[in-house]
Amino acid sequence: MKAALPMNAADHAWLRMDCPENLVVIHLAFMFVAPLSLHAVRAKLEARLLPFHQFTHKAKRGWLSSHWVPDEQFHIDRHLTEMHLPEGSGGKELKAWMSGEACKPLAKDRPLWLATLVHNVEGRSALVMRVHHSLADGVSLMDLISGMTDIAEGAHYVEPARAGERLSLSPGVIVRHIGSVLSDAATMLFMRKDKPSKIKGAPGKHKSVAWSDGLSLAVTRDIAHRHGATVNDVMLSIIAGALRHHLQAQGQKRIDAPVRTVIPMNMRPQGQSHLLGNQFGLVGLELPVHQADPLDRLHAVRDGMTTLKTGFQGQLALALVKFAGLLPHLLQQLVLGIFSRRCTVIVTNVIGPAEARSVDGVRMDELMLCVPQGMTVGVGVSIISYNDQVRIGFLVDNKLMPDCAASAMAIRTCFEQLKRAAGANVVPLPLAACEPANEEAFWPAMGQDREVLAR
């Protein structure tokens, strides 16, 4: 019999962040160009997921710690099902079904994940997965996805962009950078509350899922290079435009303040993306929803993130989450709740495969990851790249953002507006700024705003 395995402190903290109004469950959607067989999907999941104990063990919750306990009843068919949407269904119906599933908790008597092969999505198949955040973060999930898919016929492997290395908070690093560490700790300690808006409030149980059409990654890079920014800066500025559009549509006539956004910062050393669990910090960015001009929004995001490229808020935040995972549940809620109450939105950015992928010879033409919100934050936004395109997804509370489908559609409009503005106001860059090597364009680790966490 397999032995129980201890759950690390960060994963334990994420396990206990679940509440009926805000489940901490990551949603993944893989869209294929043709129907896909359940047999092929089962074979891929068995080969790729089952070697990791998190996908075959239950979470046994404890007062101060939790363990991964082998599920003696485990069978993949308890986690993998298939369903058929009504004939004539498409992406709208798929997202509506996912919205209904988003409020359902994962069963506690088995490992915390589910997969559903959905048919009749415009005559095609989609694989939808729900994975509790305590099992994995976005980086490790993308590594799993690469392993459970093949390079599509006619495609060639492309090295994906990656974030630069982050310094760990070792005693030596703290001593050498004591001024910056103390400054960032003070910023976290005295962070003010976010100002009220239509998208800030107590979340309810019901959620909505939507995502945008694909945007050209090449054009996004061009905009970024023209203005000394990163791909991540460009996408964040587009999200700010879409949220501004939503606030106006909901009747908020006066938008005179930014919206604080929580952004995960990848803290994994290079070469460890295959390890499951959570290894990221959280930092805060002031999204300039109050600025009407798309270029002003881009420059504000770029400047805010550039300021913190050498900061330590992400490392401090990860240490805080680990510390909270060692506390009794009530104290964890008090510690991390201070942080969540001071923020409005969470935005995650995930690097998917750079080339087209397939399963059983069927090409995957869309990939989406929807980030859960957690605690009192009700709006989750995801940026994900795949095969030369980038998409923005929404997993939001219905009360706070009742029409996220319209916001997903607005992404294209905001992108086109920024593209026109960027072409008309070119900022010359040195040649080195246009070189793609080790492109720090995706992970927000490469620069954040001066705001972040709590006590």
Image: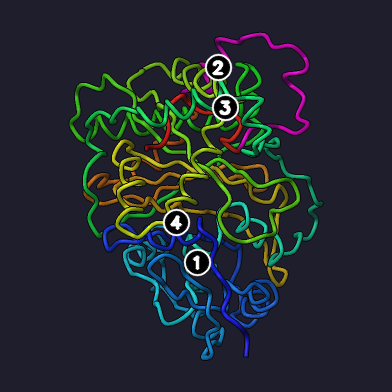
Residue 85 against residue 14 in the figure, above or below:
below
Q: Disc 4 on helix, strand or loop?
A: helix
Sequence-first disc among 1 and 2: 1
**Badge 2 vs badge 4, beta-carbon distance below 8 Å:** no
Residue 320 against residue 328 in the figure, above or below:
above
Q: Nearer the viewer, mark 3 or mark 2?
A: 3
Q: Nearer the viewer, mark 3 or mark 4?
A: 4
Cα separation, mark 3 vs mark 1, equals: 37 Å
Sequence-first disc among 3 and 2: 3
The residue to which callout 2 is attached is 422
Q: Amino acid at mark 1?
A: Val
The circle drawn on residue 128 is 1
Q: Amino acid at mark 3?
A: Gly
Sequence-first disc among 3 and 1: 1
Of residues 415 and 73, the one drawn nearer to the viewer in this rendering: 73
Cα separation, mark 2 vs mark 4, equals: 44 Å
Of residues 196 and 319, the one drawn nearer to the viewer in this rendering: 319
Residue 436 against residue 57 in the figure, above or below:
above
Colour mapping: rainbow
The circle drawn on residue 311 is 3
Sequence-first disc among 2 and 4: 4
Q: Identify the residue shown where x is 47% and y is 64%.
A: 132
The residue to which callout 4 is attached is 325
Cα separation, mark 1 vs mark 2, equals: 36 Å
Magenta-colored span: 417-442
Q: Nearer the viewer, mark 3 or mark 1?
A: 3
Q: Identify the residue shown where x is 48% and y is 31%.
A: 236
